[in-house]
Image (cartoon, rainbow, N blue to C red):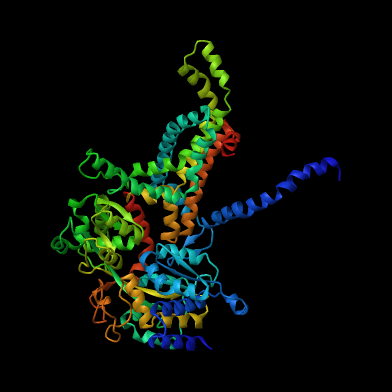
């Protein structure tokens, strides 16, 4: 039986009610992962049994969603261990991929179109056969188009979800009205000195610096003004957080009262009962995540995995777990009750209300800006 | 082959597995780093092989790197002094304990059983706004509002002291344990007070251990990356953090290689100076 037939039969069993959702997601998700982590050597060792599979993601509630809806039931059903790799950021993961053997890393839950561009520019991309991924047709076209523009029309990934890096604030200290009125300026309000946080990511710092100085983040004309805004924020901030888990901890423990934040993480805090508000200021930082296939991976198997992961039942379950809207087009797919309530959700499927980073622009300035930020952060 | 020749070869034969491992896992990687330091980063984050001095020119002349290096050395020095001041009495107490010495040494080793990262992060739950210390202070009525204690240079030094103190205590303990206690009695019989006998007899004899502990604390402290990353504020960074940023964030492996070699050279020079004046033998005793 080929893999497609096997997935189709599983899907039929699930749709017929013969299989509960957890088992269904676990079985097919992990089966796909097993293909995703095959090395080229596996082709020559067909008799070798797969004992471990690997998938790299963002950890925290995102990984929890994958584990709950795919990995754990799979391991229980098959006995195959899923190596649930995590990374704290795209930069760190890229360093790991670059030092690995081809095929060691296969599929990664990457963030940002500029990450896609970096991987592509470093020769780490592949050309997916989209005919093997029919569910790609269900995705918001604008998300795929952003990737196609970089890799000459082909894709090395499928879009998977999207979100924003907006502003989160503790309502016990900052009202919704104040947050709306000040927007990005809230992050450099001296009234909150020592209670301001920020992501230790040069792109985000510069993006918000642009907003604070009234500039278009994708066309900054006065970079010195932006650096001054970054310095101002630095001097008021208590801490630059480095992971989603730390962001949630800082906000939940009231170590900080206001910060930029990832929409899904703040939704998770709100679900836990924390009275935290979240706004996307005008030109707020929109981003999308994708499932990127890294050069050296077994293509056909990966494409089948991607097709399964984009199956609405799977995609919606993961999106509900990680609190980021899926890449599925809401005009084509019924996304259920929860997803329309998530921050950044666009019911039109056009994403026209979000501002994404222009990868050419940001990657073109990456070297200079990342090095300068390192200095500015330390007081220069 | 003569007996003399065979005997001369024997140490090398016995050492060969160790030398092979050291060569493959230490010397060869360092040589790779040396080579990398002369390459350049391309615009897309790849490397351009060649022989370029740009990274070394930046590393050696840029005020930014010099300042962070000096900050790193200053933090390491403060940490070392604090460790010495706190570690010496603890080591003295253990060395002079009449009973339960083994238990005390076990307690000293206990922190090593817990991950360094976990130990460092524990301070967040002690010093945080809603942490144990603030909760206690407010419960006792000493403060009305939480005091902001985290994410500054002081907490970085605190985390380093927490990490390095056992190294200092162990080294001083080894030294004090070797001091003949009858020497203090002899000093007393000659009219010295306890304080005088400590200052003029015990302390000088234990100085090699104190120096070895100080060297270890300083070198380990200066090379740390985790503590400022976990407990520092936006500005707080040590030199190893710059190496991390160059390699991981900026994908500038050649510059990261040059920076790491500079740190290696500075700390290596300190070890050489120590070895010149005191010898590494005492250090080995402490580590053993």
Q: Quick check: B112 left or right of A171?
A: right
* Residue at figure coordinates x 22%, y 50% from the top left: A193
A369 or B233: nearer the viewer: B233
Q: Position of residue B264 (x, y in %)?
A: 51, 46
| Residue A123 visible somewhere in the drawing | no
B107 or A192: nearer the viewer: B107
Q: Is residue A378 above or below residue A308?
A: above
* Residue at figure coordinates x 41%, y 48% from the top left: B120
Q: Position of residue B42 (x, y in %)?
A: 45, 65
A320 or B243: nearer the viewer: A320
Q: Looking at the image, how many numbered discs can be counted on the residues?
A: 0
Q: Position of residue B127 (x, y in %)?
A: 32, 45
| Residue B109 visible somewhere in the drawing | yes
Tell me where residue A223 sits by quadrant: bottom left
Q: Quick check: B285 left or right of A329?
A: right
* Residue at figure coordinates x 39%, y 66% from the top left: A58
Q: Is residue B40 above or below residue A157?
A: above
Q: Position of residue A274 (x, y in %)?
A: 24, 60
* Residue at figure coordinates x 41%, y 78% from the top left: A25
Q: Quadrant of the C terminus of chain B?
A: top right
Tell me where residue B248 sits by quadrant: bottom left
Q: Is residue A11 above or below residue B158?
A: below
Q: Is residue A361 above or below residue B23?
A: below
A108 or B272: nearer the viewer: A108
């Amino acid at each position: 039986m080929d893999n497609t037939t096997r997935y189709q039969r599983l899907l039929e069993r699930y749709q017929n009610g013969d299989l509960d959702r957890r088992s269904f997601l676990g079985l097919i998700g992990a089966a796909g992962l097993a293909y995703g982590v095959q090395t080229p050597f596996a082709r020559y060792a067909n008799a070798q049994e797969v004992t471990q599979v690997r998938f790299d993601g963002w950890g925290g509630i995102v990984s929890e969603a994958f584990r709950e809806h795919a990995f754990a039931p799979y391991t229980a059903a098959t006995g195959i261990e899923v190596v649930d790799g995590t990374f704290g950021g795209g930069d760190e993961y890229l360093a790991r991929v670059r030092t690995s053997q081809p095929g060691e890393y296969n599929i990664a839950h990457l963030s940002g179109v500029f990450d896609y561009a970096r991987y592509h520019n470093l020769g780490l991309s592949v050309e997916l056969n989209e005919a093997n991924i029919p569910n790609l047709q269900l995705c918001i076209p604008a998300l795929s188009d952003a990737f196609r523009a970089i890799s000459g029309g082909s894709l090395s990934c499928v879009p998977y979800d999207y979100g924003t890096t907006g502003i989160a604030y503790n309502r016990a200290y900052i009202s919704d009205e104040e947050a709306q009125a000040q927007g990005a300026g809230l992050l450099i309000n001296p009234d909150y000195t020592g209670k301001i946080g920020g992501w230790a990511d040069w792109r985000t710092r510069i993006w918000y610096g642009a907003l604070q100085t009234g500039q278009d983040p994708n066309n900054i004309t006065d970079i010195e003004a932006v650096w001054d805004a970054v310095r101002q924020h630095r001097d008021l901030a208590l801490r630059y957080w480095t992971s989603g888990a730390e962001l949630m901890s800082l906000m939940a423990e009231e170590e900080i009262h206001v910060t930029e934040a990832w929409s899904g993480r703040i939704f998770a805090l709100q679900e836990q009962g924390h009275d935290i508000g979240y706004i996307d200021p005008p030109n707020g930082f929109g981003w999308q995540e994708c499932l990127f296939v890294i050069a050296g991976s077994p293509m056909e198997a990966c494409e089948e995995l991607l097709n399964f992961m984009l199956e609405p039942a799977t995609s919606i379950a993961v999106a509900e777990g990680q609190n980021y809207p899926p890449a599925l087009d809401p005009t084509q797919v019924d996304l259920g009750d929860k997803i329309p309530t998530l921050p950044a959700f666009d019911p039109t499927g056009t994403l026209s209300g979000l501002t994404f980073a222009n990868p050419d622009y940001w990657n073109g300035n990456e070297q200079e800006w990342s090095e300068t930020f390192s200095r500015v952060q330390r007081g220069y | 082959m003569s007996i003399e020749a065979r005997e001369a070869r024997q140490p090398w034969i016995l050492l060969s597995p160790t030398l092979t491992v050291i060569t493959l896992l230490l010397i060869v990687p360092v040589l790779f780093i040396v080579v990398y330091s002369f390459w350049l980063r391309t615009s897309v984050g790849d490397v351009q092989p060649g022989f370029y001095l740009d990274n070394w020119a930046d590393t050696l002349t840029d005020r930014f790197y010099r300042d962070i290096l000096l900050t790193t050395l200053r933090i390491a020095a403060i940490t070392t002094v604090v460790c010495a001041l706190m570690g010496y009495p603890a080591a003295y107490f253990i060395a002079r304990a009449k009973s339960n010495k083994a238990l005390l040494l076990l307690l000293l080793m206990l922190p090593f059983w817990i991950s360094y990262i976990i130990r460092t992060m524990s301070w967040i739950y002690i010093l945080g706004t809603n942490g144990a210390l603030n909760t206690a202070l407010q419960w006792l009525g000493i403060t009305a509002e939480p005091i902001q204690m985290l994410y500054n240079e002081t907490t970085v030094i605190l985390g380093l002291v927490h990490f390095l103190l056992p190294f200092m205590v162990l080294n001083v303990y080894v030294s004090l344990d070797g001091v003949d206690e009858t020497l203090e009695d002899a000093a007393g019989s000659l009219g010295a007070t306890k304080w005088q006998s400590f200052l003029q007899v015990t302390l000088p004899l234990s100085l090699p251990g104190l120096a070895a502990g100080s060297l270890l604390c300083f070198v380990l402290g200066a090379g740390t990356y985790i503590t400022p990353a976990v407990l520092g504020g936006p500005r707080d960074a040590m030199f190893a953090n710059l190496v991390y940023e160059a390699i991981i964030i900026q994908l500038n492996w050649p510059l990261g290689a040059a920076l790491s070699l500079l740190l290696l050279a500075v700390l290596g020079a300190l070890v050489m100076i120590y070895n010149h004046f005191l010898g590494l033998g005492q250090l080995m005793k402490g580590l053993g």
